[in-house]
Image (cartoon, rainbow, N blue to C red):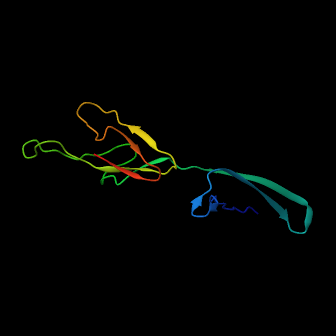
C-alpha cells in the first residue's frame, strides 16, 4: 500500500520577526514492529525577505508592470500621475535611483529611505 505525506516549511520566528537564512531538520521514519526498518530524511528550506518593498500600487498592477491606464488627449491635459511607496525594511539607509524612458518621469528620481521607513514616489 502507498501513502502520501504532506510537509510544510514555516520559517521560525524570533520575537516578531522571521528568522532568515537556511534551516534544516532531520526526520526519522520507523516502521512499527520492525526495528531494522528506519529511514532518515534531511529537510531544508530557506527564508529570505526583500530589503525594499514596493507598496500601495494602483489597481491593475502586476509583477513588474505599473499600469497607468488610459489618458484621453482630447479631454485630459498634462500627465497621468500614479503614486506608490517604497518601504525600507533594513536597519540601514537605502539609496535608490530611477531610470526611465523620456516619456516617463519619476519624482524623486534619486533618494534615500531612512531605516525602517517609507518613501512616496510619483
Foreground residue, 45 or 89?
89
Please provide percent x and percent y for residue 3. Answer: 72, 63
Horizontally, residue 13 falls left or right of residue 69, namely right
Pick the quarter of the image with the C terminus: top left
Please provide percent x and percent y for residue 62. Answer: 37, 48
Foreground residue, 12 or 118?
118
**Point 51% across, 49% down: residue:** 90
Please provide percent x and percent y for residue 66. Answer: 32, 45
Horizontally, residue 102 falls left or right of residue 38, namely left
Pick the quarter of the image with the N terminus: bottom right
Please provide percent x and percent y for residue 34. Answer: 91, 65
**Point 74% across, 61% down: residue:** 2
Q: Quadrant location of residue 26?
A: bottom right
Foreground residue, 111 or 7?
111
Q: How many marks?
A: 0
In the image, farthest residue toward the bottom: 33
**Point 32% across, 37% down: residue:** 109
Foreground residue, 21 or 6?
21
Amino acid at each position: 500500500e502507498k501513502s502520501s505525506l504532506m510537509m510544510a516549511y514555516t520559517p521560525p520566528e524570533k520575537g516578531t520577526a522571521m528568522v532568515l537564512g537556511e534551516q534544516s531538520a532531520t526526520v526519522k521514519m520507523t516502521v512499527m514492529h520492525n526495528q531494522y526498518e528506519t529511514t532518515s530524511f534531511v529537510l531544508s528550506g530557506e527564508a529570505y525577505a526583500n530589503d525594499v518593498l514596493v507598496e500601495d500600487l494602483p489597481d491593475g498592477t502586476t509583477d513588474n508592470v505599473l499600469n497607468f491606464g488610459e489618458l484621453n488627449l482630447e479631454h485630459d491635459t498634462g500627465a497621468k500621475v500614479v503614486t506608490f511607496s517604497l518601504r525600507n525594511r533594513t536597519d540601514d539607509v537605502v539609496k535608490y535611483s530611477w531610470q526611465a524612458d523620456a516619456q516617463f518621469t519619476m519624482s524623486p528620481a534619486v533618494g534615500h529611505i531612512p531605516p525602517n521607513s517609507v518613501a512616496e514616489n510619483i
